[in-house]
Image: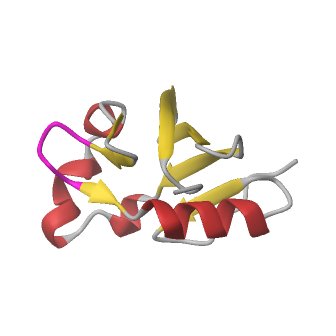
Amino acid sequence: MYWDIIDVRPQGNRDIGVRFADGLEGTVTISPAFCTGVFEALRDDSAVMQAMAVDGVMTWPSGLDLAPDTMYREIKASSDRRYVVGGSVRLAA
């Protein structure tokens, strides 16, 4: 699908660059507020930076993953091509 993730580039600061099959690129920020329950392991910044693309999905060695269609929709709709997972934090321009 066009929303399949083909490249993941951890950038530090809980930010992960992503590129989709149709060429759309953006940044996903994993908010600490999101890291509860099954996602508790992502409270650790170093765990966030282990993200990788597997079969069109951003995933982690532990088996956690995020829905690529939601990331695609949020990044495409955002003027700064950023999706904050678990929050609406906007960084100052």
Coordinates of residue 10 in the picture (x, y in percent): 47, 29
- Compared to residue 77, the image places residue 28 above or below, namely above
Which secondary structure type mostly characterizes the magenta part of the structure?
Answer: loop
Decide if residue 23 is in sight here.
yes
- Compared to residue 91, the image places residue 84 above or below, namely below
Coordinates of residue 89 in the picture (x, y in percent): 64, 64
Which corner quadrant of the image does residue 79 belong to?
A: bottom right
Coordinates of residue 59 in the picture (x, y in percent): 29, 45
Which corner quadrant of the image does residue 33 belong to?
A: bottom left
Going 60% across and 61% down the picture, which residue do you hit?
72
- Compared to residue 88, the image places residue 84 above or below, namely above
Decide if residue 89 is in sight here.
no
Image position of 52 (left or right of 47): right
Residues 12 and 62: in front is 62
Image position of 35 (left or right of 14): left
Image position of 80 (left or right of 86): right
Going 49% across and 36% down the picture, which residue do you hit?
6
Going 30% across and 31% down the picture, which residue do you hit?
50
Going 51% across and 57% down the picture, which residue do you hit?
1
Residues 1 and 84: in front is 1
Q: Is residue 61 magenta?
A: yes
Instruction: Report the number of discs.
Output: 0
- What range of the chain is rendered magenta? 60-64
Q: Is residue 11 magenta?
A: no
